[in-house]
Image (cartoon, grey):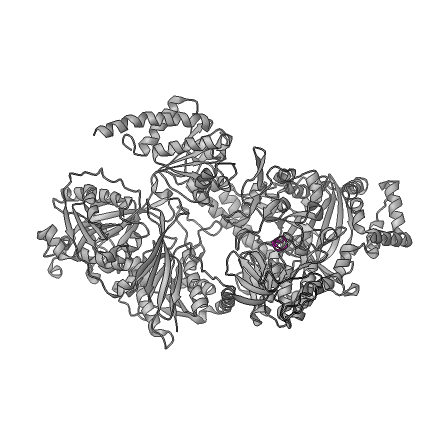
Amino acid sequence: MSLNVAVIVKLEPDFSEGNISYNADGTLNRAETKSKLGAHSSVACLAAFYAKVNYGANISVATMGPPMSEIALSEAQSICDADSLHLYTDRIFASADTLATAEVLKKGIQKMKENENENNNGIDIIFSGHRASDGETGQTGPQTAWKLGYPFFGNVIDYHLNLKDRVVTLKRLVVLNGMDNIIEEIESPLPVFIALDPSYKPSFTTLSSRLKATIFEKNAEKKVANFKSYLKMFDHNSLELDPKEVGLSGSPTIVYKVERIPKGKMNRKAEIIDGRDRNQIKNIAEKILILNGQYGRS
Amino acid sequence: MEDFDVIIIGGGSAGLAALKHISALGKQAILIESGKEIGSKNVSGGILYSKNKEYGQVHNVEDIYGQKFLEEEPYERRITKYILNATSKDKVCSIDLTSIHDFQSNFGCSVLLNKLNTWFAKEAQEEAQKQGGGIVTGVHVKNIKWNNENTPIELDGGKQNSSTYDNSLIVETDELEEFRSRAIIAADGVNSEIASLLRAREKFSPDQLYQGVKVVIKLPEEIIEKRFEIGPDEGAAHLFSGDISLNQVGGGFLYTNRDSISIGGVYHLSSLLENPVEPDQLVNSLINNPLVKDLIQDEVPIKNIEKNLSKEEQTKKSFTISKLIRTWNELREIYYSPKNREKTIANGKFKSIEEIKDKINTTRRRLVEEFNTKFVTNYVELEYSAKVVPDGKRCMMNKPYYKNVLFVGDAAGRGIFLGPRIEGLNVGMDDAVRAAKTIIKYIKNNLTDPNIGEIYSQSIHESPYTRDMKKIDKDYLKVLLKAVKKIPLEDLGAKNNFLIRCMSNDFLRNFAVSTINKVGFYKFLSFVESPKIYIDIPILLAEKLGRKINTSTKFDIPELSERISKLKYYEDNNSHIIVTKPQIEFMKKMTVLCPTKCYSIEDQNVVIQHEGCIECGTCSKETSWKHPRGEKGIFFKYG
Amino acid sequence: MIENKKLSDLEDGNNSNSYHHMLVIIEVVDGVVLPVNYEMLGEARRLMDFFNKQYNSNEKVIAVVLGQNIKDLCNELINYGADVVVYADDPNLRYMVNQTSTKVISSIAMDKDIISKISPDFVNHYKKPRYMFFAADSIGRHLSATVLAELDSGLASDVNKLEISDLEIKHQHKTKGNALKYGKVLEMYRPDFSGFLWTTILCLDNKNPEIRRDFHPQACSIIPGAFAPLEPDPKRKGQLIEFTPKFDKKDLKIKVLNRSIDKDKIDFDSFKIVISFGKGIKEFPEDNIKLIETLSKLTGAEIGISLPLSKKIFKLDEKINSKYMIPGRVIGTSGRKITPKIYIAIGISGAIQHIEGMKEAEFVIAINTDENAPIINECDIFIKGKMEDVLPVLIEEIKRIISPLEVQAKRK
């Protein structure tokens, strides 16, 4: 039984020291800063790789972004031994918010259904990372899922498939303020959209599956050397997208202003107090209770 | 349960050689390594030797990996110059011992183990995958048990009917479901957990071990060649004894790599326990030696960030400077390396060498003028590491097996200390091939022959390396004396002088050596490996005969904490060390001798201070010491 | 008919005829309303009070609750500021499964029957809510995205400041470069990825005739702890409306098989104040821990430790060890990064690894004997002294302030 999975990834600036560069005005210098496959995206690729090794999945990786985003696709391929790479690139896609991005990804994934191998009944699982580290906030995944009509599961830490019944069982980590963390185990028929928790690790539990994984890893290495032959590019025409629905035109939200967060949190200057001075300690007691909302007004 | 013929535990040079050899002979074998990647937990001094076969059957690196090893050069440099330096303060007496280096060897090359083992792994993996085997990393073996514990097993040649005999093993790991194997090669290093688990041998005691501590230093390729007066295909090794050893038995070493330097010390653990010195201080004393200073110094940029800026601004500025410094470094790496130069010009990034030079200068100027960066004479450390080294003559396993588990290399306590020359990598690789051959022979019989261990043991005893661990070679002594002869020894005192003259006589020497070997070479160790030979004589030599080296260079040697903070760890919440005897003297000394100061004393109890452990095993004898779980713990980039 | 209206009408935001009220999506987990929901209700109340006064209108704060046996919780939501509570009580809603929850919430948002019960005047034109709030947590983040995909509008996530205002916008796409007035805009502030900047997100209708499209509701997810809840008022009156959800058979095949508590994690995020201790407790570890426990009880704090302590370096009662000396409590690079309002570091020297975990705290107090300890550069108040001396005094002073307050509260 065939299994088709798609992975949505993103190219992100490398924020580590020695790679990141700032303009004179203190804003990020995107041209000088190296970019790479986002950390959360790599986790999504690992999940797809698990599907490849354990269930023989056919993997397509997709990203929306400028042409240089092909770097992210090749890095993704080296992780998950992807069979095809899809780059959605078009000037009019630029500056899209999550809804407009989801519109592009929806069409792209629908196209995969049409384009991939014949005995194909569509994409069974879409994987994405938890979020991007450069501003996007984990909404693109769920919105793409919704537009495609796929049930969405976020913060997934483990999953297994029953290919015969086409059912997935998965575990997700639910973090709620004021509650203990919950691990929720869910069963759902395919297809599904899975966003991986950052803590996800593929759970190869047998030596033979680990061995098998090394063979796929090696395949991936070979493929990546020639990743462009796996790469397909799409613009709004080939995706049959209405220009009104994408990019800035299709985005409900705009960034209205950017301002410095007042109060230089990072610049502390300690007031030094003698621990023997009861009066001072009394002031601190008050200060704690006021800040804590137990006393007076904050 | 899954079944496999052969499991190799440990992905060091020895384990990989076993995998390569078994696979090359057409059988399936699987190597299990606990590190996140192959090579990430391996440290060596280090020189890898190839032994001349005139002196006995050995399996050298080029036999195992073929010509490819010589063509692709996963090693650093072939050592062509081997010099012993006796030191005392600013005086150094250098003795050319290249003949010692060449003794019975085809070649010896400096190596960085991460790179070397990664290359070995690539070769071995390819071969293994053809047979359905391979390498699995990030898996830590925590227990081995026999499938049928009730089956009586007689060691040492007990005869059993092999058709009814089931000696298959069950391997338990932290990460995977249990699996079965018919034979195991334990190549899990000097702190072999498998050996402890099976009680195949005692944990090595301080007397049997040396502690090696090393830093890898960055130095551009052609600068190395100029400094050490070597060609592009040559390498230099410097050994040190004398005051740099801070009164410890052992010595220092400095090896040239392709574009880095390995520098460190190897000291007898008994000596260190007797008179504890911080291991990093031993490295520092070597780095501070004037000869070494001259050899390793380089131009180093120092970041300078105005303190009156907000922290946010400081961070950003610091990041921008880091980026520039990185560019400057990368350009130098290109400029000083013929291969890199060619490549960069070929791919059109630069038109000419001059253009690279220009770019280096403009980057440097920008750093100085725009960012107030200072360039000083200093040196750059890349990595701090440590391991303990087994002294084979004191600790090699007489029977390096337990049932159908065969121990190789460090795990079997097999290392050679030939005077200043230390060999371990090649020994382990040779052992591994012997283990592989034994197993291949028995694979036909389903590996059920209870004699498998004994057959392997016999093969090991035929190894010339075993001979080197057991006996003094009279020819070696002759070569050594010949080398030393060039220096006027009259000044060393009548007693020493007399001894050397006696030993220089072929007849007397041969007689002495054969007597010693007959009585037992190890009985004379305290005489040979004494403070007198390792410390007093070299100091005397340096003072009487040494040349004075003037240097005004002042190094900014990093604090230990800085060295530790540069290392890469994958934190494990489960501690892999448990202090079981918090009050004994040994543990108290560990607060000094642990190379990363993992221990401190709280209320007269030794406690683990932090988990900056680099898994050297110095403390292993008296602690409950295990390797961290799969993928966890230290990750050496150079090794 | 919007198409027939003149542009000047659009400029006034007249199409807001179709969009009314503020929907606050409540999360009930195991029969408990999460604290962040009360904070959201508080902020919704403040904003809508302002809105109704400013625009002389009568729009409501509508809490939406899904779950099983949740009816009893509804009054509490009114006490905390909701005008209306719409609840859907069904065994299939026992857990917040994204697929079913999204559909039920979206149906509620567009249900004209509900609107006719709340405000019959609006019902003819009503299309969708004006504003919507979700919690920025594992449930709400995803739910906000899918609900807004269904309602075809935009949202900002992880918001920590909100304002409603009338703005003049000049935007290449939204207004075709013309300066146009947008009324009743929700300004949504969120800290950007660098942590240095605040980005204000607006969700605006496309008034540019070429790409004309409405984007309502204006929605966001709200960071827990960003806003204060109102003092609950049991006398507040409100309307309860039951909604009977319909389910797609297909969606009911998604089943929650099992739920378990992940005990490893200490929930630092829901505490305003965190008190950590380090090796400085060494002289009298057990006594000092008792003092720290007392202080934490008085202030409602959670307790953290520095890394070395998790290695159980002191000989302590096993109860204390298993409660405190655990990796889950470690603050720092190899533990948790936290951002409480107040952080009290007791006997912690401030190794760089530890600083990484707490430097985002709003106000930091350190108690330490050593003025050269690096923590001094990372705190707002440094109390120089032995914790054995300082803590009892601090506890005494806090008690002295609190106890009369408690007596007052009881009298009320």
Give the residue displayed 84% in from the left and 41% down from the top.
B492
Which of the 4 image quarters holds residue A283? Answer: top left
Q: Residue furthest left?
A: C121
Query: How many dots with numbers?
Result: 0
- Residue A57, image x, y percentages: 41, 69
In which image quadrant can residue B129 be found? bottom right
Q: Residue at x 33, y 52 (%)?
A: C138
For residue A285, say whether it is visible: yes
- Magenta part, dominant SS: helix
Tell me which segment is drawn in magenta: B192-197
Can you give x and y, in whole percent of width and height, for residue A172 in the image?
36, 56
User: Which residue is situated farthest in the bottom direction here?
Assistant: A118
Q: Nearer the viewer, residue C251 or C55?
A: C251
Left or right: residue B457 compared with residue C333 = right
**Percent from the top left, x then y, of residue A241?**
28, 68
Q: Nearer the viewer, residue B75 or C340?
A: C340
Which residue is nearer to you in this view: C354 or B470?
Answer: B470
Q: Is residue C386 left or right of residue B181?
A: left
Can residue C182 be seen here? The reply is: no
- The quadrant the N terminus of chain C occupies is bottom left
Tell me, yes or no, whether the highlighted magenta stretch contains residue C126. Answer: no
The C terminus of chain C sits in image quarter:
top left
- Viewer-closest of C158 and B139: B139
User: Where in the figure is residue C196, as x and y percent of width and height?
Assistant: 37, 44
